[in-house]
Image (cartoon, rainbow, N blue to C red):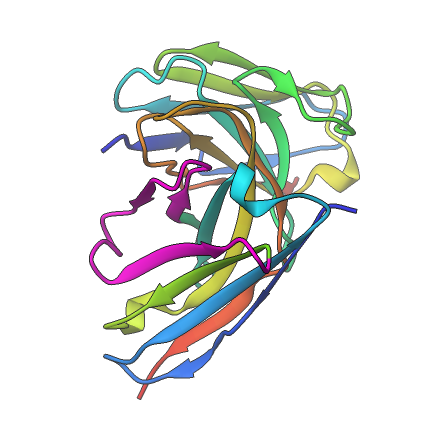
Amino acid sequence: DIQLTQSPSFLSASVGDRVTITCRASQGISSYLAWYQQKPGKVPKLLIYAASTLQSGVPSRFSGSGSGTEFTLTISSLQPEDFATYYCQQLHNYQFTFGPGTKVDIK
Amino acid sequence: EVQLVESGGGLVQPGGSLRLSCAASGFTVSTNYMNWVRQAPGRGLEWVSVIYSGGSTYYADSVKGRFTISRDISKNTLHLQMSSLKPDDTALYYCARAIGFCTSTSCRGGFDPWGQGTLVTVSS
């Protein structure tokens, strides 16, 4: 089974900061990786798929990169509505597992 | 409008069974890769199961042999039959469609939309 780790698990940042979250896979997954945002009590929202493709309607301050085993989600200028938990997900090889999440909190 | 609505959650005793349903509108369940994802209270997301458009099904190791995913083409509905339930199965269960380019093993995509979820509580 493919395992995902995310770092950091918790991040404290200010509005306007550039934020980067890393997701690592236990084996190569090409670009079969997606990123989600989840706010408390809300349904997860797809941000990025195929490692770097921005989902329709998602602000351009979000971007994704990487392939193989290491991936990053970058928020270029953190906005108040971006404080949430972010999950990566691999969609390779029959099981579509999620990472443990990164909580982005207000500094 | 593309929408998913789950139902069937509730309180069940350990060892019991429950069947969840997910009604789709705005698209056809049988031509998409449909998934169940769960989230235990205060915890992260856990992928549970997928049914491919061709009918193949796959499960997380934690539910294999206990859960069965299926679909009703006439009602455009996805189901999850859960048996031998354990307290660790307590969670909010979401259904979600995979979008993007999917093959027999992988999806170059993600999950969208998601339903609002149905709560399953396993407790005596």
The quadrant in which residue A69 appears is: top left
Q: Is residue A106 visible?
A: yes
Asked if residue A67 lies left or right of residue B105, the reply is right
Asked if residue A50 lies left or right of residue B89, the reply is right
Which region shows up in magenta?
A: B48-75
Compared to B16, does B6 lie above or below?
above
Which percent across, then down, holds residue A54?
Answer: 67, 20
The quadrant in which residue A15 appears is: top right
Compared to B57, does A25 lie above or below?
above
- At x 78%, y 39%, the residue is A80
- At x 62%, y 55%, the residue is B115
Asked if residue B71 lies left or right of residue A41, the reply is left
Which percent across, then down, holds residue A27?
Answer: 26, 19
Of residues B108 and A40, the one nearer the viewer is B108
- Residue sitting at the far bottom: B124
Residue A49 falls within the magenta-colored stretch:
no
Count up the numbered dots.
0
Of residues B19 and B73, the one nearer the viewer is B73
- At x 44%, y 21%, the residue is A32
Which percent across, then down, holds residue B79?
Answer: 46, 61
Q: Can residue B41 be seen in this view?
A: no
- At x 67%, y 43%, the residue is B27
Which percent across, then down, holds residue B58?
Answer: 31, 43
Image quadrant where one finds the C terminus of chain B? bottom left
Of residues A77 and B63, the one nearer the viewer is B63
Residue B61 falls within the magenta-colored stretch:
yes
